[in-house]
Image: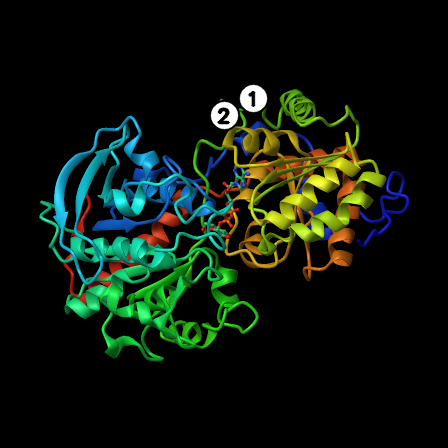
Amino acid sequence: MGNVALKGIDSDTKAVPRSRAFTARLEEFRLDDTSKTGRDAALPRARGEGRHPSQRILFATPEIADFVKVGGLGDVSSALPRALAAHHDIRILMPAYREVRNSALNIRRVGHLPAHAELPACELGEMTCADGMVIYVLLCPELYERDGGPYGTGPGGYGSGGWEDNDIRFARLSLAAAQIAAGQAGLDWQPQLLHLNDWTCGLAPAYLEWMGRQVPSVFTIHNLAYQGLFDRSRCTALGIPDSAFHIEGVEYYGRLSFMKAGIVYASHVTTVSATYAQEITTPEFGCGLEGLLCCKAQQGRLSGIPNGIDDSWDPRTDAHLVQAFSSNDWRGKRANADYVRHRFGLAPSAGPLFAMVSRMVHQKGVDLVIDAAPSIVQAGGQLVFIGSGERRVEEQLDRLAERYPGAVAAYIGFDEYEARCIYAGSDFLLMPSRFEPCGLSQMYAQRFGSLPIAHRTGGLADTIEDGVTGFLFEGANLASFMLAIQQAFSVYHSTELFYAMRRAAMTGRYHWRQSIAPYTQLYRRICNEAGVEVRQAG
Ligand SMILES: Nc1ncnc2c1ncn2[C@@H]1O[C@H](COP(=O)(O)OP(=O)(O)O[C@H]2O[C@H](CO)[C@@H](O)[C@H](O)[C@H]2O)[C@@H](O)[C@H]1O
């Protein structure tokens, strides 16, 4: 275990970043000014941006935080369609998992989706949320009503421990999107455009192609590392023609790739930050698909549109918190810190509280945090982890907490309430991700006045201002990470600077409203290219 000493942390302020730009930028936040911290004050309101073309869009997703959330995609699927609904007739499609069936919302049967190959026929239900958002749900109990997560029984669900029939389950979801778009579901509503998310929806544009139907589609990559790879022998069961199993189709190194299908057959590919859109065209981040993604980029068919966060993430009003707070008054933040220390068995302390709220997987660099922990503790810091993921990592976290009672706490599990209190109560959020398509945690942390310490990659590079709203370090290795942690300690002990950074972080403009215009322009462009008539919204 690398234990890099943090020498002279208390007195050494040399490590505090003090470039001219940094000083000038932070000067704005030295004294509190509530007009700056009023969130999104300068952002146009959703309906105030003028006239937008309005399209009928079906947004297909495997998870939505209203019912089931494994990670960031659940948040995006809940918030993005709602932000877009002010301008488009957008509806959501997802499987009717047990959590959906058990929800208080009434499900009306509105359509029927025919079988195809070994994909069973199923009913289509419609639910209307309290805010009017319409969600179509795939009613197929044998595929979706199970004890366990949407992707499997394994913690975190994405990777190992996936359901054995995930090929059928998510081919069924993809086919449903295609059938609805093709007008084969018996609905009185037909989308003009599909917006598809991750490998679980990747076959949708391919099915449309094989049906001979031209419906424009956007395929959004939230994480290229999870590709939905299956044995080629499964093609027949999934109704994939032999003629599509080649290098320019669904074939990926001899296997069937749902992710590749989405990239190949969709009209346009997006990912969730500008930096990640560029990174995935390189061998280091492209997961073997960099050649294809490079071609897409050259054709102008790959772009990065950053995620945002929704209005529920406001420390002044969030009912999950022990006490509300704003950048005017840190008492509420301290009350949340006291709660977190008490709740997770940490000792009272005047030192900084570091947090990690994450799926505990290799991507997130949790091993680096585990290696850094002894030095953080030695320097007077405390650490709280909340997350679940790879069993081996969970066990390491438990051992770490046992080794440093009162200084390190690990909560293995998923709990939205505690996660929000941890963002609110912590001083720093650790996010040394090896890659990060966008990342929402660092945006939530900033909004709640917890400064992220993050690897300069993907969306982290795009949403953290180094030395102003957080700390960025180059290269996902322990030495660089420790230097950033050292800077954080120095800033923590320089109270005025620390509060100025907190205020700067809390003003970050990461609202979904920022994403409406780029998505709208993209939808309009691909509809125009496909000859789909778009009406002007009133
Ligand atoms: N134990 C726990 N209890 C409660 N809440 C927990 C939790 N562990 C994590 N969370 C929550 O899960 C979400 C994680 O979202 P991220 O976007 O940061 O990462 P994720 O890798 O899941 O998403 C992927 O998709 C999103 C969406 O596009 C991209 O931002 C990201 O880069 C990509 O890896 C946050 O809402 C966080 O608060």
In screen coordinates, is 31 left or right of 1?
left
- Callout 1, which amino acid? Ala
Residue beneath disc 1 = 324
Left or right: where 320 falls relative to 397? left
* Residue 246 located left or right of residue 241: right
Depth check: 80 or 242 in front? Answer: 242
530 w.r.t. 498: above or below: below
Q: Of 292 and 412, which appears nearest the observer?
A: 412
Between 384 and 430, the one lying in front of the other is 384
Task: State yes or no: discs 1 and 2 in contact (Cβ < 8 Å).
Answer: yes
Question: Disc 2, ligand 1: is the CB inside 8 Å?
Answer: no
- Quadrant in the rendering for residue 422: top right
Q: Which mark is residue 318?
A: 2
Q: Residue at x 36, y 35 (%)?
A: 67
> Seen in the image, is 410 located left or right of residue 250?
right
Is residue 17 something that shows in the picture?
no
The residues tagged by marks 1 and 2 sit, at their Cα atoms, a distance apart of 7 Å
Secondary structure under tag 2 reads loop
- The location of residue 501, given as percent across then percent down, is 67, 39
**Viewer-proximal residue among 11 and 437:** 437
Query: Where, quadrant-wise, is the C terminus in this rendering?
Result: top left
The answer to which quarter of the image holds residue 456 is: bottom right
**Few, some or many residues within 10 Å of mark 2 (<14, 14–19, 20+):** some
Q: Secondary structure at mark 1?
A: loop
Whichever of labels 1 and 2 marks the residue nearer the N terminus, that label is 2
Circle 1 packing at 10 Å, graded few (<14), some (14-19), many (20+), is many
Q: Amino acid at mark 2?
A: Asp
Q: Residue at x 54, y 74 (%)?
A: 283
**Residue 68 is drawn in which quadrant?**
top left
